[in-house]
Each structure stands twice: as C-alpha cells, then as structure tokens.
Image (cartoon, rainbow, N blue to C red):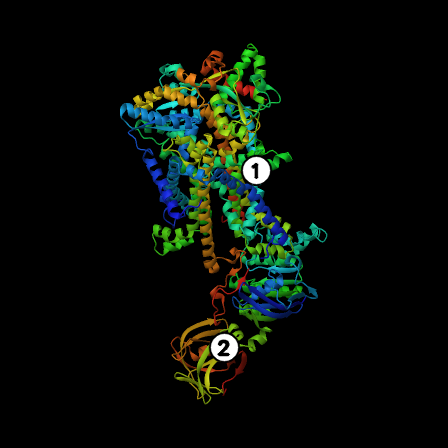
C-alpha cells in the first residue's frame, strides 16, 4: 500500500496520463478499424466477410498459424533448455542468433527465402527440376512464417528458465527420473504459463504477418492468399470497407488472442497467490496484501505449541 | 456482431476446411486451371472477364476450366514468376515487366509479335483527376508546373503508371521546348518538385488525393482516374484528358515455360486471344480502357476524347534504353530529384 | 525518545491482524516483540515505522515519539531507522553509497557537506567493522556483513528510534549469536530506543530489556526477560518461552493418576494437566512414596553444560524432555534403554489465563 | 553433434538432453535462420567492394539512413518514457480497466503492420480524427518524419512495456520501504533507487524497439509520404531496389540494416550479461 509513487496525486496523475496516452495511441487505431469496417452497416460487413475468397483466406491463415505453432514450440523449448541448462562455448552467440528475425525487415526475410528456394536459387533450382514447389505455395508461406515467429517462444522461456535454475530437474534426476520424465513432470509444469504466452504471441504474429508472406505467397486468390494479403488486395481494389472488414477480423483474432492471454495470466496469478506463501521468498511478494509466512519450522522453539502456518499478515 | 454460437462455429469450421482444401490445391474444383498473373488494380476487371471466358471455353471444348488470379505490383509479379510462380499468362501494365520474363526465357522472345497491336489488347493514357469545378484550371501539362499547383502520383521507381506520368510530362516538354535539354530538365525538375506525396503505388496515391485531401491533381491512367471518379462520386471530381499524352500499352503474353509444364498451352493462347474478342473488348471499355475492336470503339466513342497519343519508343527509343537512362539507379529521375 | 501507542488496531480485509492495543516503550530501551507467525508482531513494528497505517476507528488512535505526534507523519519524515529481514540493500550501490544514501537525499538546506557525509559514513562503517569493504557491492558480501551494512545505513540518518524486523532471521546460528551480542553492545553505547521483532524466544530473552509477547494480534505479556520466564502470566507465554512437558491425569484424594503412574499433588479432585520445564524433572533409580513415574531413556544428547534426555513411557502421550547435569548423568550411568523413575521438582498449571506455580505436595 | 565435443574438463552434466536440444537448436537455426542468409550473402558476392560501397553510400540511401535512424531513435525515446510509464502504472496501481489496458499493450504485436499503417495514416492525415485536431495547431504528422516516428513507436511499444514489466513486478517492496525509511522523497527514490534496477530492462526493451523500428516497412510507408531525401526510410529503398530487379543492390542495403541491428542486439545481450553479473555477484 505504501510504496513509492503511492501519493494520491501522483497516482491519479500517472494513471490518467497512461490511460489518455494509450487511448490516443493504441485504442483509437483499433476503434478506427472497426468504424471503417462497419461504416456501411453490418450487412455490408457480413457480405464482405462471408465472401468465399475471404473465407478461404481466413482458413489458410488459421491453418498456417496452427502449423507454425508446434514447430516454434519444439524449437523454442529445445533452445531454452539448451541455453539455460548447459553452459558451453557459443551460448551467447546462439541467443543472439535467435534474435535475427527481429533484426531482419520482413520484406528482406521473404526475399532471402525467395533467393534460396525460388526457381533461381541454388536449392530452388534443384527443387524445380524435381517438380517440388515451395515458394508461391503454402509451404513457402509456412517457412517464412516460422522464420518470423520463431524467437517468441524461446524468448519467453529463456529468462524464466534461467531464473528458475535447474535444481528441480536435478532433484528429479537424482530421484531416478529419466530425462523425459524430468522434463514432462518437473520442467513443463513450471514453464507452462510462459509457454502458453509464447504460443499466443507466435499465433498473433503468424496470423498477422504481411511483409514476408507477401514476397513468397504469389497471392493467388483462393489458393495462397492469406488474410493480411487479402486486406491489401481489397484495399488496392478500392474496396475500403471490405479491406477494413477483413482487417477487423484480424483485429478480432488479435483481441481473442489477447483475451486468451489475459485469461491465462489471471489464472496464473491466482495459482501463484494460492501456492506462493511457502515457496516464494518474502521479497517477491506483491503489493496486494496476502498471507505469507516465512518462518521456517525448524527455527521455532521446539516445545512450542505449533501454530498453523500462513498466519502473519504483511504487506 | 450478434451471431449465435453454433453459427459462428460453423463459419470458423467452414473457413478452416476452406483453408485445408487450399493447402491441397484450388478452392474450386475444375478440370484444368489457368493462372493469370496481373497488375494490382485489375482485380475487378478479370473478375468480370474470367467467368465469361470459362463459359465460352466450356461451350467450345466441353471442358470445365478455372482461371485463377494473382495480383500485385507489375514488377513484383514478374519477379515472382522469375522465382517460380507458375503463372500461365501475364496481363501486365508494363512492357518492361514482360520483357524481363522474355529475357529469362520464360516468354517467347518475339512476344510482342505473337498477338495484335504489340501484344496489347487494350491501352490507356495518362490523364488528370482534379477536384470539383477544376478550381486551379488545369488543362494541360504546363499547368502542372505552376507554383500554386501540387500533384499526387506514385514513385516512378515503384509504380508503372507513375512511370507513364513521368514519360508523358517529358514527352510534352520535349515538344514544347523543341528538344532543348536544359529547359526540359528544368520543366521536369519543377514537375517533380510539385509532387506532394510519393506513394508506392496507384492505390496509395489515390488515398492521399481522395481520402487525405492532398494535392490538386492526381495523375494516373485514364482508365483509373475514371474508375476513381465513379467510385468516389462523379460530382466531386473531374477527369481532364490533356490534348497530348502518352500511349500506355497493357502487354499480355503466354508464359510458355509454365504453360507447357502445366499442360495449359492451348488454354493460355485461347485466353489471350479471347481478350481481343468483341465481348471482352466491351468489358474492357466498360472499365474505361481504350480498345481496338471497331464496333466497341464506336459504342464508347463519347467516353474517350480524341487526343494525340505519342508512342514511348518514338520519343525515348527502346524500353531498355529509356529504363537505363531515366529510371535506373542514378538515372535521370534520380538526378532530377537530387538536391 | 520514547514511543507511545494508543488504541492501535489493524485489519487486512476481514482478518484482524491486531486487536486494539496500548504500548509504551521508554527512552533508551531495547524491546523485543516476540511471538509466533501471525501474532501481529511485524504488523505492529511496521505501524510504528509508518510503513503501515493503523485502522481508522471511532476512537482515534495515536502514535507518539516522545512528545511528537507522528500518527499522520509519512514514514520518510518519521526519523526512524528500519532494518529489514532480508536487508533490502540497494544492489546497484556500493556499500559506501548504501550507507550514504539517507544523508545524500536530505533536502539541500539540511544536507551535510559531502566531506561531512564521508566522515560520518566511514565512522559508521568503522563501527560495523566494514570500512575495508566500502567499495564492494552487496552481492559480494556475506549475509552477516550485509546485515551490518543495513544497520549502518539505518543509523546514518541518526534516527529517533531504530526498528528491526527479524534482523537475524536469515543468518546461520553462529553469526546470529555474534551479531546479537554486537547489537546489544551498540545499543548500550549509542543509547537509542530500539524495537525488534523475533520469533526466537532465546533471542528475545537474551537481547531485550523488556519483551512484548504477542499472539493472535494481542499482547499477552510485557515484562523483563527474567520475570517473563519465571512468572509467565498465562499458558501461552509459558509454552512459548521454552520446552514444555505435559502430564495429564485424574486427581483423586491428592494423587494424580495416569495409567500405572501416579504422583502426589495438592489439588482438588478432577481432571488436571500439569506443565513442566525440562530442568524441573529429576531422575532417580527408585520411586518414592509420593511419586511413581517409571520412564525409559530413548535418546541422549549432551548440549553444553547439560545433557538432554528424552524419556518415554506407555502412560505418556508424548515423550518428555529432561535436562540433567553432567555429574548426575555420570552418577546415574545413563544409557539408552535404561529404566528410571522421574521426580518432579516443580510443576505449573494454568486455569483460564491465571497462572499458578506449585511444588509437589512434598518436596 | 556429440556432447563430448563441448565438455569442459572437470564439468559433468547432470541433466540429460544436451545432445537432443543442441541437435534441434543447431539444426533449426542452421536451416531456418542461417541457410536463408546465404541467399543474401550470395547476392552480395556478386558485387565488387567498390560497387557495394557505392550503393550503400549513395547520397539518397545515406539520407534514408538518417531518416530511419533519427525517427527510430525518437520512437525509441518516446517508447522508453511512455513504456516505462505504462509498465509502472500496470504494475503499481489498481484501477478500473487495468486488465484491458494490459491486454491492449500486445495489440501492436498482433495487428498486421499494413493494417496498422493504413489506420495510422487515416487517423493522422489532415482530415483524419487526429490530424484534424493537430494540423490547425501547426503540427503536421502524416507525411513527415514525425509520422514515421509515430508508426515506429506504435509497432514497437510492446517491446519496452513487456521487458520492463516483469522486473518491476519482481522489485521487492522492501526496496521502496528502505528508501522511504531513509527519508527519500518519491522523485529522488525513483531516480536513485528504482531506476537503477530498471535500467537493464529499459535499455534492452528500448534497444529491441529501436531494432524493430529499423526494419519496419508495412506500417510506415503509408504514413511516410516517401519524399526523396526527406521521408524515405531505408526499408523503402530496399523495396525500390527490388522493384528494379536489383537484388544485389537490395541485398547490399539490407546488409547494412542487418549489420547495425545484429551489432545492437549483440551489444544489448553482452551489456545485459555484465549488468546482471554485477547485481548477482559474479554468479550470473
């Protein structure tokens, strides 16, 4: 309750400022999208959304996202395990390498895939001779989507797994658990929420990726046209309402994703308050008053009539 | 959206199944499928023509075919084909973009001779869109270099139609100053300086002009300024076609390498031939393109004022040459824009 | 500076952490707040510090430091020194900067010159014997060293009162012992008013001038360690202050019987529970007419001046703990499994908060 | 990939899975991240060094670096302040709508950049909701570098908020209390006690935001105006080169951005490692 910046005036000022700026900066664009989408009424919106090509674009986008997630998941977990549980030369380099997709402009990302796997690329020409088409077909879209989204899971997991340390897994291994058992029974439950968050971010980005996909997709309507590309095409076509209707769909997917994330966090927070009392050190306790008892049993007077734990109230 | 839950679920299910079939192949089922790679503002045009072609082919050959469309910037589309997009035919708005494919051996070297009129079933020219009542009194190219006039057209480097705007202005100046290079360049420098926003494509420029209210004149193809005027209200905008402008060809070609591979050679050939048919030409004229079919030309005579059109090759030499001198890196365009 | 609390109570949501209480701490006193987890001792300390505000009730509450009413005064203006259980050192500052912090954030008008700050910080570091570590960062120090820095930091601002929240809780036994003595010494030397919280009765008894025993948000007893130990006011205090053995049985005609054991007590008939400290049990090889309490030795551990002996018997619910002197230990030749008889030197019983201390009927 | 190859003398690995995780990670990084990069470098090797140098030091390209770096720096600065404020408010205060605000933070991640670009341009153009308010005040956003900075700030704000937030959450209450009990006023305590804890995350977040801004394309081109020398960003110049079928030129410019970004990311990682080590006494 009494922390730095808790004076009512400061508090109100900062909250007001944050809300006002967020409303202008973040909420307004969102409102604008929906306002445009519905500017000619719900019926027009609906006819745009239920168009067969729009439906196909939605479907393709979701399927690509669903395929991207497991790939990123396996990679993210493996990499996080590697860099947080072992020390070896080149660890920091690996960690920087996974940031490459952040550093590469999406258009360039698409380009480098095209240069490699396209008909003139050194892999692409071989593929072309064997009649395997990756670019301008769904595998190409999947490949660049994976490229763009692969850091998210790993980036969520690494700090968490670093903070948790490997003691629990070591304990499991000394108790005779195999590596897999230790992972499934000990590691996974601990990183579950971060993992979920990583998946949600991956999904959000996979659904929304435009730049990289536009280079490798070919944007064939009804075949390789994803929803963001569809938005662009409708827009190019002077169908502004249609474009924003699809954009609103994307925003809606984004919002659902965010809602899912908020829900997860809420559950995680509830879990934490329920179980934290005798696990977390006092210093981690949050500003909400909650029961926490740090007294280790063994330091209590031995003959004492032991009180049930979890009594003392602290901030 | 007040959708009941089961309905919503069925929509999602439908969308996903559509996506899955998309992975497997086409969303529609047809015996054969032809892919037409085209420029980005031709979507509605081909959405109108393709069903008629499909019906015509079915009638002629008793075969169900499906024409799929891929749209994008003309150069981006050509690049995609170079890198493996398996389009059977191209219908572009830039001669150079087809030439790139020919250079790479995907399109026959003599593609311009393969079909009539330089393999261009329809054409257009650069025209002006001005605001209601033409408040700045824009009539011709020399009005565009006035100090009180600001222009909107895309970057000639990224947009084919802006390239034509540039060439048309140059062609006008060439005539006006009788080939005096210094004066032509000065004219062009002013012309480019009057541009308020360089968008990447025609669509962006339109948005800037119409929705953002920027500039006094939007330069684009005659077909497009007319479409825009129809789209955004005939009362608010006027189309000005200057007395002299450039002939903008819309080249078509069969991408032979791909068509052969896809077993579509006959279909591709027929598709392009079809664009020269009276029915198709009528459709094209309806989208404000100038066409060659005489019956149709007469029908639409009122819509297309007669003006002097000059051929790019006549003024600038070959396309390769003019791309090199004007639009290449550090070419004339870059020099004119240098400060 | 004395501390006076009037009508202080505290709720967290629906839970009552402190029942309304009064407390006066005299100037120069070192007072320990002792109680189990959940007794409200930390809350009380934090209210004194101003880190927590007491409930607002219809009867006004008040906190006085000497004559100064600090009830509404913010923690930063109360002029207190607070030592945290986990030290709460600023990790990004060197030891020197940590100690100098309080001085360097004073308003410009009252801030000492930087030379004066330097002098004072080094004097404090000398006092806590850490002057050679001034340039180190907290992460490079041991727990005991960190706690000394924390103390120096709290003292640097020359607080009116020094408040310590479980100051030695996180340290190992030997360091804890050392720091305790050192704190007592420091307190005597500088003579400020100090309040500290602990759940360790040994620590409270050793260190404090007076101990405030708390449970369930109530003050059970305030007394000097000596009085507290010898005259606990109620069963809670008695049990909390040391090891306790229980003897439960039925009294009839002045004899308490429990299974095959019996002992003479001067009590009216009825059910009784007697409480015994370990040193109040005497061991012998034979029973006496007044006392027949057969026990078996189950564990022996020599600790310091005494030997702790664990005793079991089938009439006992929980084993007893007795302490015997080394001389007796040798005389009785104690070994595990040996059968002996217990005699009671003294015993205690409490009826609803009232204490009574008796000796066995004949002794 | 045998784990023996990486074993240091005297260290034994208790936990299993080194080979497997190393295998997956290296394979993935090689195939998905590094292999495609060879495409980029393959293009670069088609250029002589003097050609390469001429491309990347062309006056117009250099102007685009200035615009991009300048706008990205401004965006990063805005985000550092705004992101810190948001993280602070979200962690420290309870108020109605907090959960909503928290969820809103991820919106720029989730929204396709092109949609964001079109929408921002719509809002801040002279006749947009915001533009109508700002332009009479002589403050033009759309089609100036301010617009570029704004679009960059929009797409990269989550980086700052989401990196600062967890650190702020883990900041022990005692740190606040200690600072207050020593008499520090809010401002002083924030500056001298809390900020030092947040610096690493704030710098990391701001750095990531900056890097992201350097590469951003979709959200910016609509609002940039793309005037030569004035509002052309580097990503746009890459795009122009591509339109000219000049892969080598595009790759050359892309390599400059990539190099700057990677160096920044590496610096951030190394610096963070240092800082963490100091705070945790060499164990980090």
Image location of residue B9, percent across then percent down:
37, 45
* Residue D105 coordinates in the image, percent (x, y): 51, 45
User: Does residue A161 sit above or below A140 in this rendering?
Assistant: below
- Discs 2, 1: same chain: no
Q: Nearer the viewer, mark 2 or mark 1?
A: 1
State the residue lying farthest toward the top. Answer: B178
* Residue D158 sits above or below residue C163 on the image: above
Q: Is residue B73 left or right of residue D93?
A: left
Residue drawn at x 60%, y 61% as measured from the top left: C52
The quadrant of the image that shows the N terminus of chain C is bottom right
Q: Which residue is mark 1?
A: D129
User: In the image, residue C248 lies at what x, y percent?
Assistant: 44, 80
Quadrant in which residue A47 is drawn: top left
Q: Label 1's element? A: helix
Nearest the viewer among B329 and D50 is B329
Q: Is residue B265 above or below residue A198?
A: above
Would residue C119 be visible to someone looking at this image? yes
Q: Chain of mark 2?
A: C
Marks 2 and 1, Cα distance to the nearest angstrom? Answer: 82 Å
**Tag on residue A112?**
none
Residue most extreme to the bottom? C253
The chain letter for the residue carrying disc 1 is: D
Residue D258 vs residue B4, the one in the foreground: B4
Q: Position of residue B118 (x, y in %)?
A: 40, 15
Q: Nearer the viewer, residue B177 or B66?
A: B66
Q: Nearer the viewer, residue C96 or A288?
A: A288
In contact (CB < 8 Å): disc 2 and disc 1: no
Q: Is residue B182 left or right of residue B59?
A: right
Instruction: Note whether residue D267 is visible.
Output: no
Say which residue label 2 marks. C277
């Amino acid at each position: 309750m009494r922390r730095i910046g808790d004076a009512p005036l400061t508090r109100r000022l900062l909250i007001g400022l944050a809300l006002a700026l967020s409303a202008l900066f973040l909420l307004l664009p969102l409102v604008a999208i929906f306002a445009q989408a519905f500017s000619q009424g719900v019926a027009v919106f609906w006819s745009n959304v239920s168009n067969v090509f729009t439906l196909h674009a939605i479907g393709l986008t979701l399927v690509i996202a669903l395929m991207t997630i497991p790939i990123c998941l396996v990679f993210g977990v493996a990499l996080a395990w590697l860099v947080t549980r072992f020390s070896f030369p080149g660890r920091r380099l690996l960690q920087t390498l996974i940031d490459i997709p952040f550093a590469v402009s999406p258009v360039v990302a698409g380009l480098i895939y095209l240069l490699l796997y396209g008909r003139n690329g050194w892999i692409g020409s071989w593929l072309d001779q064997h009649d395997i088409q990756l670019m301008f077909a769904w595998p190409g879209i999947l490949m660049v989507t994976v490229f763009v989204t692969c850091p998210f899971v790993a980036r969520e997991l690494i700090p968490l797994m670093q903070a948790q340390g490997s003691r629990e897994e070591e304990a499991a291994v000394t108790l005779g658990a195999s590596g897999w058992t230790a992972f499934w029974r000990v590691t996974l439950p601990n990183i579950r929420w971060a993992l979920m968050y990583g998946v949600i971010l991956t999904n959000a980005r996979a659904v929304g990726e435009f730049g990289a996909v536009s280079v490798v997709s070919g944007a064939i309507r009804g075949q390789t046209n994803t929803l963001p590309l569809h938005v662009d095409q409708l827009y190019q076509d002077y169908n502004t309402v249609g474009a924003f209707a699809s954009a609103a769909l994307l925003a809606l997917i984004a919002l659902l994703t965010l809602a899912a994330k908020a829900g997860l966090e809420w559950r995680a927070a509830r879990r934490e308050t329920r179980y934290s009392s005798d696990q977390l050190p006092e210093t981690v306790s949050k500003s909400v008053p909650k029961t926490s008892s740090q007294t280790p049993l063994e330091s209590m007077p031995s003959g004492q009539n032991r009180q049930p734990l979890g009594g003392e109230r602290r901030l | 959206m007040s959708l009941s839950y089961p309905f919503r679920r069925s929509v999602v299910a439908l969308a996903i199944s559509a996506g899955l079939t998309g992975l497997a192949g086409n969303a529609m089922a047809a015996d054969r499928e032809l892919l037409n790679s085209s420029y980005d503002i031709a979507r509605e045009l081909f959405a109108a023509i393709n069903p008629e072609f499909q019906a015509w082919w079915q009638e002629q050959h008793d075969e169900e075919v499906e024409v799929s469309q891929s749209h994008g910037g003309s150069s981006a589309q050509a690049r995609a084909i170079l890198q493996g997009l398996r389009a059977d035919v191209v219908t572009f708005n830039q001669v150079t973009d087809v030439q790139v494919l020919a250079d790479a051996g995907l399109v026959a070297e003599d593609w311009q001779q393969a079909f009539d009129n330089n393999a261009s079933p329809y054409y257009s020219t650069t025209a002006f869109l001005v605001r209601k009542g033409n408040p700045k009194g824009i009539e011709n190219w020399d009005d565009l270099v006035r100090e009180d006039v600001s222009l909107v057209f895309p970057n000639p480097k990224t947009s084919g139609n802006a390239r034509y705007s540039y060439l048309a202005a140059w062609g006008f100046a060439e005539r006006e100053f009788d080939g005096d290079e210094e004066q032509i360049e000065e004219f062009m420098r002013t012309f480019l300086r009057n541009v308020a926003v360089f968008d990447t494509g025609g669509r962006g420029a339109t948005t800037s002009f119409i929705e953002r209210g920027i500039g006094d004149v939007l330069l684009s193809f005659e077909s497009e300024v007319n479409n825009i005027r129809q789209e955004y209200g005939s009362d608010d905008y006027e189309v000005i076609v200057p007395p002299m402008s450039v002939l903008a060809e819309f080249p078509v070609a069969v991408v032979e390498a791909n068509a052969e591979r896809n077993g579509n050679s006959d279909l591709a050939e027929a598709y392009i031939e079809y664009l020269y048919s009276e029915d198709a030409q009528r459709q094209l004229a309806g989208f404000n393109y100038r066409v060659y079919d005489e019956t149709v030309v007469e029908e639409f005579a009122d819509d297309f004022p007669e003006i002097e059109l000059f051929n790019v090759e006549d003024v600038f030499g070959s396309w390769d040459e003019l791309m090199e001198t004007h639009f290449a890196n550090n070419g004339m365009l870059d020099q004119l824009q240098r400060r | 500076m004395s501390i006076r609390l009037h009508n202080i109570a505290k709720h967290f949501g629906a839970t009552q952490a402190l029942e309304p209480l009064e407390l006066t701490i005299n100037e120069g006193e070192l007072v320990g707040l002792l109680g189990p987890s959940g007794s409200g001792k930390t809350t009380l300390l934090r209210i004194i510090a101003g880190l927590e505000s007491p409930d607002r009730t219809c009867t006004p509450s008040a906190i006085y430091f000497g004559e100064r009413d600090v009830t509404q005064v913010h923690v930063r203006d109360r002029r207190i020194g607070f030592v945290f259980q986990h030290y709460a050192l600023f990790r990004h500052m060197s030891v020197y900067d940590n100690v100098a912090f309080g001085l360097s954030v004073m308003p410009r008008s009252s801030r000492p010159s930087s030379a004066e700050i330097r002098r004072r910080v080094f004097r404090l570091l000398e006092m806590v014997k850490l002057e050679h570590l001034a340039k180190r960062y907290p992460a490079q120090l041991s727990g005991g060293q960190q706690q000394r820095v924390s103390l120096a930091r709290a003292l640097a601002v020359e607080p009116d009162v020094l408040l310590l929240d479980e100051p030695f809780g996180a340290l190992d036994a030997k360091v804890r012992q050392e720091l305790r003595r050192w704190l007592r010494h420091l307190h005597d030397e500088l003579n400020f008013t100090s309040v500290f919280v602990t759940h360790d009765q040994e620590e409270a008894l050793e260190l404090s001038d007076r101990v405030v025993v708390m449970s369930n948000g109530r003050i059970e007893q305030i007394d000097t360690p000596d009085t507290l130990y010898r005259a606990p006011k109620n069963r809670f205090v008695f049990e909390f202050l040391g090891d306790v053995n229980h003897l439960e049985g039925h009294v009839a005609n002045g004899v308490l019987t429990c299974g095959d054991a019996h002992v003479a007590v001067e009590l009216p008939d009825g059910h009784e529970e007697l409480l015994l400290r370990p040193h109040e049990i005497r061991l012998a090889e034979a029973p006496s007419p007044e006392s027949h309490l057969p026990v078996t030795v189950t564990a022996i551990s020599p600790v310091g001046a005494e030997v702790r002996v664990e005793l079991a018997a089938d009439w006992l619910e929980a084993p007893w703990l007795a302490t015997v002197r080394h001389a007796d230990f040798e005389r009785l030749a104690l070994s595990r499994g040996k059968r002996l008889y217990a005699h009671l030197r003294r015993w205690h019983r409490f009826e609803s908060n009232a204490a009574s201390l008796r000796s066995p009927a004949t002794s | 990939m045998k784990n023996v190859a990486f074993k240091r003398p005297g260290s034994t690995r208790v936990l299993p899975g080194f080979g497997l995780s190393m295998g997956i990670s290296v394979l993935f990084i090689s195939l998905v991240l590094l292999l495609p990069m060879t495409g980029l470098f393959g293009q670069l090797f088609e250029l002589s060094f003097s050609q390469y140098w001429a491309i990347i030091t062309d006056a117009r390209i250099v102007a685009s670096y200035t615009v991009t770096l300048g706008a990205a720096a401004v965006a990063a600065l805005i985000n550092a302040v705004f992101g810190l404020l948001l993280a602070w408010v979200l962690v420290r205060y309870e108020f109605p709508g907090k959960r909503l605000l928290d969820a809103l933070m991820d919106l720029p991640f989730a929204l396709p950049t092109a949609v964001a670009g079109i929408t921002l341009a719509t809002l801040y153009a002279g006749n947009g909701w915001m533009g109508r308010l700002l332009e009479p005040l002589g403050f033009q956003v759309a089609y100036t570098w301010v617009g570029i900075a704004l679009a960059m700030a929009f797409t990269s704000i989550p980086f700052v908020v989401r990196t600062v937030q967890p650190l702020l959450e883990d900041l022990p209450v005692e740190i606040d209390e200690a600072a207050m009990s020593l008499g520090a006023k809010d401002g002083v305590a924030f500056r001298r006690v809390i900020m030092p804890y947040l610096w690493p995350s704030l710098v990391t977040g701001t750095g990531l935001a900056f890097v992201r801004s350097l590469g951003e394309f979709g959200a910016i081109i609509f609002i940039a105006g793309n005037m030569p020398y004035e509002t052309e960003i580097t990503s746009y110049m890459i795009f122009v080169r591509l339109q000219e079928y000049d892969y080598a030129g595009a790759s050359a410019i892309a390599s400059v951005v990539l190099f700057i970004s990677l160096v920044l990311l590496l610096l951030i990682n190394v610096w963070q490692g240092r800082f963490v080590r100091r705070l945790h006494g060499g164990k980090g």
